[in-house]
Image: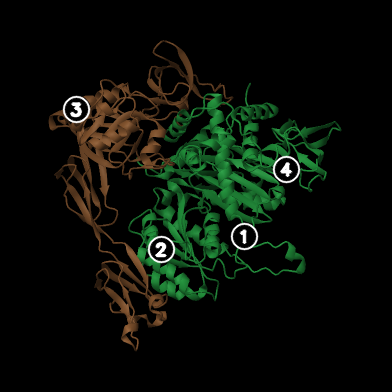
């Protein structure tokens, strides 16, 4: 029987993360197995082909496609500068001469005798792929990239915006329930991965951008503020390419929700440490969660097995006594303990018959929650 | 061979769940008997679709007591309590089949290419056309960035334009696109355009792509010929897309028939059911990420997919597309915008959660009405007669000229609407599924409605290729849950004015009669399998299918909900004022017993 709860996100003080870093198209790998790298080390590079432009020469010269080569001043493979003539006609009277200039600087790729089009390609753009993590190379893929591994602390968020960033961890709130207000963000936070509490609002976004913060990590945001930040309604949770001035990671969900104690404490214990993070999120097939990765020093990581100390939210199943978070109304965001796991299906007030659990809140109150609506937190 | 089959196993590898069903011969008929499911394992850390398939089969084994697996091998043939005679599967895992299509003219060959790809079960990422308004470099950039699984290139009738279709081929060559899966493989391109352009297209694309040439999808303007290109898409789907997806090589060796894209299989079973029963049919599968709409009208099959309209992964996109007011208009209890938006986003990021409160359930069902409506609008735009066709006209037609491109969907002529997908199949009350579909599609005249009980249409679609009898029997007996019928009047009046009067004669000679005023709705019990005669007489501004004010006499079929008499007008008129609208929605909900009190 499939597990009927949502696996929790990982919050691991000590784990090993491996990242497969692959070029979008084949290129050159610059590192070797076992090599130590930093997050900004270029591990592979390639050239992305330039944009293609089409010029319909025959229309501009008033000729037929079959004749195009007779009028071309350049051939396939030739380099051209922007404005340089590509082709010209040869009228009896010189002042009737028409030239077709190149719209770009690049090379001539194709001349078509069927359509009379000339295709030009802009020069290739170099692409440098960085390691993203401070760690070492454990595997290389010739022409493609490499896998970088690091012993680290890891915090996964539930949703993020923006791409990869590197910075030092800073905490701008007193506790995990505080809102990350604009006043709490100072110029000293430039380049940091800034940890807040339960919420950041639109004014906080503006201040973070202005201060040059590398990334913001908070419990929640309001969707209305996200809409304003992006300038559009976000339709599908596939993110990572947004350009909003910083990377945003939320750890709990939408609304004002205090950051989970364990997450907040782990991040707070890493103040001043260099970390890598990414806002890239994909909820559908091939789930990608935003993350903060804080590499451990050799002393911190040393001595123990590679995966030692790793703890995950994904376990073998729910058990009585497990700590859980409720992830749907009417108890959204509440942290409680599993009190009982009745085997029979129960009828909800909606009329649905579902598998439920009985949970105990901090004040001793017991509530019934569908198992699909809870997330397992680590012990 | 098919007559001897006693046990058949079918799986559907969805993007999140792999579902297995067992079909057995019970007496003289085929019935679906057991079902198992397990998370799909096409992604890391498993990277092997067969793990999920084996898990789902194991669940079927546990529930049925039948031994199906011997290690990782499916036992064949079927014996007393052991093995199956046939194993078939569909797949939409890993994002399904993603295609880009191109044609010379947007409303003609490009539209035909779109219909062809959609009919083959693909998601169409973009439609390129000579006249799509984009500059050449924009088209090239688009082809390069999208990375589809394959491209369908059409254009020109046979003997028609060559240069325009060659131009499109040149764009594809210039873009030098790479396939989505497997960076080292050449991108499959199907050329299904003007046969006189084949050599040129071969010259341009032959060395850069895995080019396959097939019959023109529009050999003459008056006719579409989508079959050969559709088959080529299926072949390439197996050879290029499936073969590169993790574990599919192994799975393909297990199945007794080629693996089909899930939507193509759903389309197939709907097409067969419509043909077998002589019906015009509308079907919808509303999933977490996408909504597929199928129609079969006078034998013509059309499928569309609204790639980003769904109830979990894409739920936020429904809000983005329709706007918050359209969702709020279906809510009896208003929710503040900030709270409503946050709830929708939380569903998006935690897609497997379920409503625990009535207000939350009502919100999901409000969103689904809008997702269904929008996907249907997109379907109607593509389910049209061929455009660009010259029509011969007689003098009588001069007063009633119809251009090509007329919608094939005439709601008066749709006999059956079938709903599928979690929000419809798992609605706590069946009447909720019926009302979501009635509110979204607003059927006219008399229409039957049904839901797919446990989403087994994909399994039955692929099975129908091997054993049509088993597929059809299970479809009618176990797959469809008849909800009942809806009689709806088209027209408008002042609230409270007479709409139509009715008399129902039940099979046991009881009868019921009454009348409805404009703005009212009524539910009458008529169980599954029961039929009744319904006579209805609309007032002069309303039409029940025979014309304004003209009476109708109809045979109506029952279902688990019964008969809905809908006098809310078409389009359904919702009050502008919030509290009036809430009262209206409350009255309608009460009349059909929509929610628990």
x, y (%) of residue B71? Answer: 44, 40
Figure colour of chain A: brown
In front: label 4 or label 1? 4
Label 4 marks a residue whose chain is: B
Q: CA distance from mark 2 to mark 4?
A: 45 Å
The residue that disc 2 covers is: B135
Depth check, front residue: B34 or B67: B34
x, y (%) of residue B232? Answer: 50, 62
Q: Which quadrant holds the C terminus of chain B? A: top right
Q: CA distance from mark 1 to mark 3?
A: 64 Å
> Could you say whether the residue bearing mark 4 is in a helix, strand or loop?
loop
Shown in green, the chain is B
> Could you say whether the residue bearing mark 2 is in a helix, strand or loop?
loop
The residue that disc 4 covers is: B491
Label 1 marks a residue whose chain is: B
User: In the drawing, what numbered circle is on residue A271?
Assistant: 3
The residue that disc 1 covers is: B405
**Residue most toward the top?**
A364
Q: How many marks?
A: 4
Mark 3 neighbour class, 10 Å CA radius: few under 14, some 14 to 19, many 20 or more: some
Label 3 marks a residue whose chain is: A
Residue B511 can be seen in this image: yes
Label 2 marks a residue whose chain is: B
Asked if residue B120 lies left or right of residue A246, the reply is right
């Amino acid at each position: 029987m499939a597990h009927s709860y949502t696996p929790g996100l990982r919050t691991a003080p000590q784990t090993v993360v491996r990242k497969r870093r692959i070029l979008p198209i084949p290129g050159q790998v610059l590192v070797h197995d076992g090599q130590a790298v930093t997050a900004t080390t270029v591990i592979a590079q390639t050239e992305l082909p330039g944009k293609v432009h089409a010029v319909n020469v025959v229309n501009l010269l008033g000729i037929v496609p079959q004749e195009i080569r007779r009028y071309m001043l350049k051939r396939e493979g030739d380099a051209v500068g922007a404005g340089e003539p590509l082709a010209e006609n040869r009228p009896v009277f010189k002042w009737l001469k028409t030239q077709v200039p190149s719209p770009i600087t690049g090379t001539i790729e194709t001349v078509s005798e069927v359509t009379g089009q000339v295709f030009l390609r802009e020069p290739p753009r170099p692409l440098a792929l960085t390691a993203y993590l401070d760690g070492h190379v454990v595997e290389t893929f010739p022409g493609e990239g490499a896998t970088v591994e690091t012993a680290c602390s890891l915090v996964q968020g539930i949703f993020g915006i923006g791409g990869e960033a590197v910075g030092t961890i800073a905490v701008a709130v007193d506790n995990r329930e505080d809102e990350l207000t604009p006043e709490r963000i100072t110029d000293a936070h430039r380049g940091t991965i800034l940890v807040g509490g339960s919420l950041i609002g639109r004014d906080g976004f503006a201040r973070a951008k202005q201060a040059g913060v590398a990334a913001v990590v908070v419990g929640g945001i309001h969707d209305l503020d996200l809409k304003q930040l992006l300038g559009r309604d976000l339709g599908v949770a596939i993110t990572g390419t947004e350009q909003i001035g910083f990377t945003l990671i939320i750890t709990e969900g939408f609304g004002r929700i205090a950051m989970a104690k364990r997450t907040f404490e782990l991040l707070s214990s890493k103040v001043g440490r260099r970390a890598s993070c990414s806002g890239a999120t994909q909820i559908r097939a091939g789930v990608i969660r935003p993350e903060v990765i804080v590499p451990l020093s050799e002393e911190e990581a040393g001595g123990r097995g590679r995966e030692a100390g790793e703890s995950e939210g994904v376990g073998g199943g729910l058990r009585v006594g497990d700590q859980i978070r409720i992830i749907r109304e009417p108890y959204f965001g509440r942290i409680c303990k599993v009190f009982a796991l009745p085997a029979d299906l129960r009828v909800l007030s909606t009329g649905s018959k579902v598998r439920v659990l009985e949970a105990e809140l901090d004040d001793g109150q017991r509530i019934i929650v569908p198992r699909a609506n809870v997330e397992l937190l680590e012990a | 061979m098919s007559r001897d089959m006693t046990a058949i196993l079918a799986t559907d590898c969805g993007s999140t769940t792999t579902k297995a069903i067992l079909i057995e011969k019970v007496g003289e008929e085929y019935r679906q008997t057991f079902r198992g499911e397990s998370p799909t394992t096409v992604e890391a850390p498993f990277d092997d679709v067969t793990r999920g398939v084996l898990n789902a089969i194991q669940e079927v084994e546990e529930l049925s007591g039948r031994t199906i697996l011997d290690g990782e091998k499916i036992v064949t043939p079927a014996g007393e309590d052991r093995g199956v005679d046939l194993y078939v599967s569909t797949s939409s895992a890993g994002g399904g089949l993603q295609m880009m299509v191109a044609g010379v003219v947007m409303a003609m060959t490009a539209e035909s290419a779109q219909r062809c790809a959609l009919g083959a079960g693909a998601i169409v990422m973009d439609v390129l056309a000579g006249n799509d308004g984009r500059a050449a470099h924009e088209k090239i950039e688009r082809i390069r960035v999208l990375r589809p699984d394959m491209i369908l290139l059409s254009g020109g009738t046979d003997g028609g334009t060559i240069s325009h279709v060659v131009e499109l081929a040149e764009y594809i060559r210039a873009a030098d696109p790479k396939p989505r899966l497997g960076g080292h493989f050449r991108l499959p391109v199907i050329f299904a355009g003007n046969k006189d352009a084949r050599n040129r297209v071969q010259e341009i694309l032959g060395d850069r792509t895995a080019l396959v040439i097939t019959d023109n999808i529009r050999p003459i303007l008056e006719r579409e010929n989508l079959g050969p290109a559709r088959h080529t898409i299926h072949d390439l789907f197996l050879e290029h897309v499936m073969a590169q997806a993790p574990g599919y090589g192994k799975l393909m060796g297990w199945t007794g028939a080629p693996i089909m894209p899930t939507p193509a299989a759903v389309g197939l079973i709907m097409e067969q059911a419509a043909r077998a029963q002589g019906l015009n049919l509308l079907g919808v599968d509303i999933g977490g990420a996408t909504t597929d709409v199928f129609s079969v009208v006078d034998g013509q099959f059309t499928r569309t997919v609204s790639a980003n309209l769904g109830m979990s992964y894409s739920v936020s996109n429904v809000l983005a597309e329709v706007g918050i007011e359209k969702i709020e208009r279906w809510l009896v209890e208003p929710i503040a915008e900030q709270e409503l938006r946050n709830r929708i986003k939380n569903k998006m990021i935690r897609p497997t959660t379920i409503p625990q409160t009535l207000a939350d359930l009502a919100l999901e069902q409000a969103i689904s009405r809008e997702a269904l409506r929008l996907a249907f609008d997109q379907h109607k735009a593509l389910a049209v007669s061929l455009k660009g066709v010259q029509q011969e006209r007689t003098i009588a037609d001069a007063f009633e000229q119809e251009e090509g491109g007329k919608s094939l969907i005439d709601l008066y002529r749709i006999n059956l609407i079938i709903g599928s997908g979690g929000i419809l199949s798992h609605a706590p009350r069946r009447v909720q599924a019926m009302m979501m579909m009635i509110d979204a599609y607003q059927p006219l005249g008399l229409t039957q409605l049904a839901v797919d009980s446990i989403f087994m249409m994909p399994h039955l679609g692929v099975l129908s290729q091997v054993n049509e009898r088993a597929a059809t029997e299970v479809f009618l007996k176990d797959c469809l849950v008849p909800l009942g019928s809806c009689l709806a009047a088209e027209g408008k009046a002042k609230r409270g004015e007479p709409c139509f009067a009715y008399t129902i004669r039940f099979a046991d000679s009881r009868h019921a009669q009454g009348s409805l005023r404009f703005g009212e709705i009524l539910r009458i019990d008529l169980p599954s399998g029961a039929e009744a005669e319904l006579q209805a007489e609309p007032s002069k501004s309303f039409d029940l299918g025979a014309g304004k004010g003209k009476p109708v006499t109809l045979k109506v079929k029952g279902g688990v909900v019964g008969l809905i008499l809908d006098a809310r007008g078409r389009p359904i008129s919702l009050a502008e004022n919030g509290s009036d609208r809430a009262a209206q929605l409350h009255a309608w909900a009460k009349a059909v017993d929509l929610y628990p009190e």
